[in-house]
Image (cartoon, coloured by chain):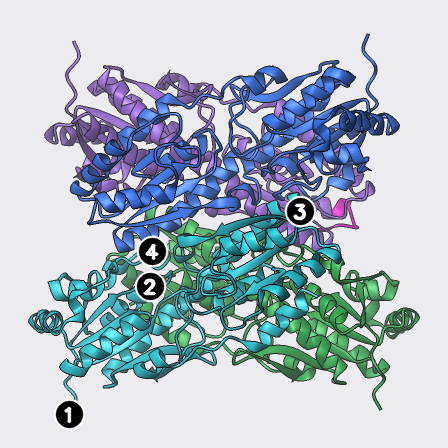
Chain colours: A purple, B blue, C cyan, D green
Amino acid sequence: MTIPINKIAVFTSGGDAPGMNAAIRSVVRACAYHNIECLGIYRGFQGMIEGDFKPMDARSVKGIINKGGTVLKSARSRDFLSPEGREKAYQELKKAQVDALIAIGGDGTFTGAMVFNNTYKIPIMGIPGTIDNDIFGTSHTLGYDTALNTVVEAIDKIRDTASSHNRLFFVEVMGRDAGHIALNAGVGAGAEEILIPEEDLGLERLLESLRRSKQSGKSSSIVVVAEGDKIGKNVFELKDYVEENMLEYDVRVSVLGHMQRGGSPSCFDRVLASRMGVKAVESLLEGKTNFMVGLQNDKMALTPLENAVKGQSKINMELLRVSDIMTT
Amino acid sequence: MTIPINKIAVFTSGGDAPGMNAAIRSVVRACAYHNIECLGIYRGFQGMIEGDFKPMDARSVKGIINKGGTVLKSARSRDFLSPEGREKAYQELKKAQVDALIAIGGDGTFTGAMVFNNTYKIPIMGIPGTIDNDIFGTSHTLGYDTALNTVVEAIDKIRDTASSHNRLFFVEVMGRDAGHIALNAGVGAGAEEILIPEEDLGLERLLESLRRSKQSGKSSSIVVVAEGDKIGKNVFELKDYVEENMLEYDVRVSVLGHMQRGGSPSCFDRVLASRMGVKAVESLLEGKTNFMVGLQNDKMALTPLENAVKGQSKINMELLRVSDIMTT
Amino acid sequence: MTIPINKIAVFTSGGDAPGMNAAIRSVVRACAYHNIECLGIYRGFQGMIEGDFKPMDARSVKGIINKGGTVLKSARSRDFLSPEGREKAYQELKKAQVDALIAIGGDGTFTGAMVFNNTYKIPIMGIPGTIDNDIFGTSHTLGYDTALNTVVEAIDKIRDTASSHNRLFFVEVMGRDAGHIALNAGVGAGAEEILIPEEDLGLERLLESLRRSKQSGKSSSIVVVAEGDKIGKNVFELKDYVEENMLEYDVRVSVLGHMQRGGSPSCFDRVLASRMGVKAVESLLEGKTNFMVGLQNDKMALTPLENAVKGQSKINMELLRVSDIMTT
Amino acid sequence: MTIPINKIAVFTSGGDAPGMNAAIRSVVRACAYHNIECLGIYRGFQGMIEGDFKPMDARSVKGIINKGGTVLKSARSRDFLSPEGREKAYQELKKAQVDALIAIGGDGTFTGAMVFNNTYKIPIMGIPGTIDNDIFGTSHTLGYDTALNTVVEAIDKIRDTASSHNRLFFVEVMGRDAGHIALNAGVGAGAEEILIPEEDLGLERLLESLRRSKQSGKSSSIVVVAEGDKIGKNVFELKDYVEENMLEYDVRVSVLGHMQRGGSPSCFDRVLASRMGVKAVESLLEGKTNFMVGLQNDKMALTPLENAVKGQSKINMELLRVSDIMTT
């Protein structure tokens, strides 16, 4: 028998991503629409343990749809790793009469949520929020589209300098163990070479490719390197290697860093967040639990949290081929 | 029996859209990859008639992936409406030994291409390039995603003023007869009301909604109006009507206009253009003709040009509902 | 004898401008630095009459330096035009123990402040906040630099379309009776012609210039028109006139509108606002009154409010000449 | 007796900066206006030695005013360090009938130009193009304003993440030995601390300041570090030092890198470049030589190249004080 849901709590956890605020807003407004109470939990699992809650009504999320970061903040929580910590969190939720949870974050967030649900059976729904797009069950995670735009705009700027000076640039982008950002932003920025963990090009073939590119008359080059790529130990060692083996190149490195996580979300991410928030609330109201809301074939779809975490978000092999053709 | 394809000509026609240059670049590089010659036709059908051609190799499209507009230019052509004009175009193409055509544009472009193919049987492939997203057979047309970002960024700015002054703004956005831009950008910008041609709200209900919004404590409002919407005769008359009927509101109008068509394409549009260009070239090489390349379920797919033009790109009803919930 | 100042109230009035929030933040923090209390007045003179005040400490202005609009809101106030309204305002200020006022706005705001000071002798300092740059005594008003960037970015986009289609665009920009925005943004956007109220080109010479431009091989043109320009009755009539007299041109109009007033302020405006806020507070503490803080030769300087309002911010004649040379 | 000037050659040298293309365009158009021939020299002094020249007319600089980088490219030239190299350059210029030179770049560029003029007496005029603003004789160098906007936009994004996670970020910005970018962008971004080479805060006082900031309730902090700052050996060592001494802080580093040099120039830089180009050409035509064009008190002014290189562009001490007040 399902317990009727009168109050939903929402939180963000893990690395922040553009669109998280838009998702919070959507959850809150969907609750208001269905006459459900909504509670915001600050600082993820740690705030859950500390009872750091705030009631949220439709007006309280005004003006946040276009803001980066998360108004509910995010934090790592060691305490939540222990049964005692989780018990404390449960007691706080019970005290606040929370009937269900919506977790916005990545696989670490979902894993924590599943462990919690395993013991305490409180209904839970996940919304994938991470710029890395490394979650199974959704074609796009929240923040991914915005990060791609941030990266191509940054590389467009670096290209101005590269082509003014006939330089080779290694640009390291985020993505953890996945090459989604590198591959898509690399194609979008017209990179001459893209290094991703999913495909090992090999140092020798990279050199060959750069030599060929140089001979074909290209005077400058951008190589986009995923942070998870294993070709060299890191992007600075890669630079040294290329400089030693290609004397004629002036090589530079740019690590784009944390600015990739911030910024006002793109329209795509704002709309996706709005759809996901509604879907998460309404799925809970329909009695569903332990699912992640996702975008599949342009429609909202549910994936068991377990699959979302264990499954693999595969790189688009067709795009990998397009990338090769573009750098002919 | 299929004639082998040794030379492909590409042109842009109709209203320009961000991503057209990225598509031209992709077509040219895919031709180079397959050792096919590529010819650029300037100013669409008119340039075809005048033989305004230019051979394009991989280097000739360097540095255009991030540029708005179209390096091949676009133009209206009355001459092409007559059989004599089309005959002249055919002779020019024959003289230049063109074996197949790739047309980048919207439904007017595709209709012209089909009429031409009907008589002259030259293989033809379409790439949907228009910010309006009003083409059947693809979830996204080239330029649509960029236009959405341009619109939400503009409305974010208008919101600064609206909320500083407690004003009501009617913001007219492009989209021809379709409400795609208005609906998506309206949700993305957190608009209080969205008026699209696909759904007739009615003036009385608009007033009611605005009154309710005001009573609920909202001090400012943004109403996004699709240019094709029929609620008032135009957005200025709409303003007058609301001012007459809601004395307490200071109402302003902003028609975003042609800046919506320009700008550097988003990463999404650059990647989509790169994929579409390759698909168009390779489909021609496989002997296909009279199709449009499109994005369906995140994959490349072909749609008969006839269907692309006649079919209707339907508004996302789920998003319409999400929009209502967001403005609770 | 000067009364010691223990509490300063700050307000924004007139049209909002990017940088107003940065100025509010600076006033508040400068008060905190000097151990003075600070009060925010909502909705300008109207809020002053209604006693709509809020104490502000250093933390209360966190995170607003990069926001457009004004967190203190702005409003027109008819009540303040009457002696009764002003008396009411004075009583509210007295009740709140306000010793001095800082007014952020344009000439309307400063005129109101002077009238008030005339009767009630409360020390007052002005900060010029308007995108129009039409205030005497400062080389730059707050928001002007940001608006220039907004305008050139919009025209860059329109240029994509103009040059793709060989069109002539009339782009109307803000600036009230002054041509500062039109002249500077016109030069910055590489406009072929710039129409400003300070210089009457005349319709016949405009046509000549456009014809010459066309003959010299230019295929597209951007004409930037200041909203205060008197050449035609308005920009749409201008379009009609040119179309009637130059058959070969496809002419379009774009009125950029209110988005020019919004957006995150440029670094220049944020820094200028920070400097002006400190200068305003410290000038009051030094016993000065009835001045406007301004930027003169890159330094902070004071101008009597009366001169700021009556004096004329002159157009840069050297730049007008540069503009002519650029369109050779 | 002055030799009449019939042909001017223009080149860019040193690090590229936004606005260089706008300056090239202005030089070319000013030459056209005065019926002077104009020659572009590719790759700075190296191209001068190699005779890598291109005649430029008014149309040849179409559409570059809004592009970052330099269409004339830039390069280091060892050959120019030797008398033989410079003699070769002189012979190439003589062969091409060049009467005068305009050098766009920083102090290295100007020094090279002066050495050259010393021997060969060819009239020379400098335009300051560098994002670092470290040139004496102009309040703003070309590219400086654009770089400030690029930096504050990047830090705004980093702030999203910093405040979502309660983190301390060290953000390293460019500027060579000068703190102009760090100080202005730091104030513009609302940084909690700004470390510049012109002022040695000392590690101990930095820690104190961060502790005070934390105690005052600030949950996140941004410290902007000029690349030329000497407080720690580099920004990563600074991070380690702070982490060791302030256990409670999660510290991150972001090195903004080369994207600071690129991007479409701001309106300010486009207008400044347009003014400087005209002034440089007309100063040569008036018989002047060995000067740099600069902005002083909002007006064009000339400074002897020798002073431009030797003099010091001082940090704005008033702004340093404003910065302290803002972080109260």
| Residue A126 visible to the viewer | no
Question: Is residue B261 or residue D55 the one in the foreground?
Answer: B261
Whether the residues at callouts 3 and 1 have beta carbons within 8 Å, the answer is no
Q: CA distance from mark 4 to mark 1?
A: 50 Å
Which numbered marker is on residue C166? 3
Name which residue lies at 59% across and 77% down: C318
User: How far apart are the two marked residues, 2 and 4, measured between alpha carbons?
Assistant: 36 Å
Q: Secondary structure at mark 1?
A: loop
Mark 1, other Cα within 10 Å: few <14 / some 14–19 / many ≥20: few
What is the C-alpha distance between the residues marked 2 and 3? Answer: 40 Å
| Disc 2 versus disc 3: nearer the observer | 3
Helix, strand or loop under label 2: helix
Amino acid at the residue labelled 2: Met
The quadrant in which the N terminus of chain B is found is top right
Whether the magenta-drawn stretch holds residue B229 is answered as no
**Quadrant (top left/top right/bottom left/bottom right) for the C terminus of chain B:** top left
Count residues near mark 4 (Cα–Cα under 10 Å), then give few for <14, some for 14-19, many for 20+. some
Q: Mark 1 — residue?
A: C1
Which residue matches tag 4?
Answer: D246
Report the magenta residues as a range: A244-250
Residue at (53, 47) in percent of width and height: A256
Q: Is B86 displayed left or right of C7 in the figure?
A: right
Residue located beneath label 2 in the image: C20
Displayed quadrant of residue A141: top left
Q: Quadrant of residue C302?
A: bottom left
Residue A73, can we see it?
yes
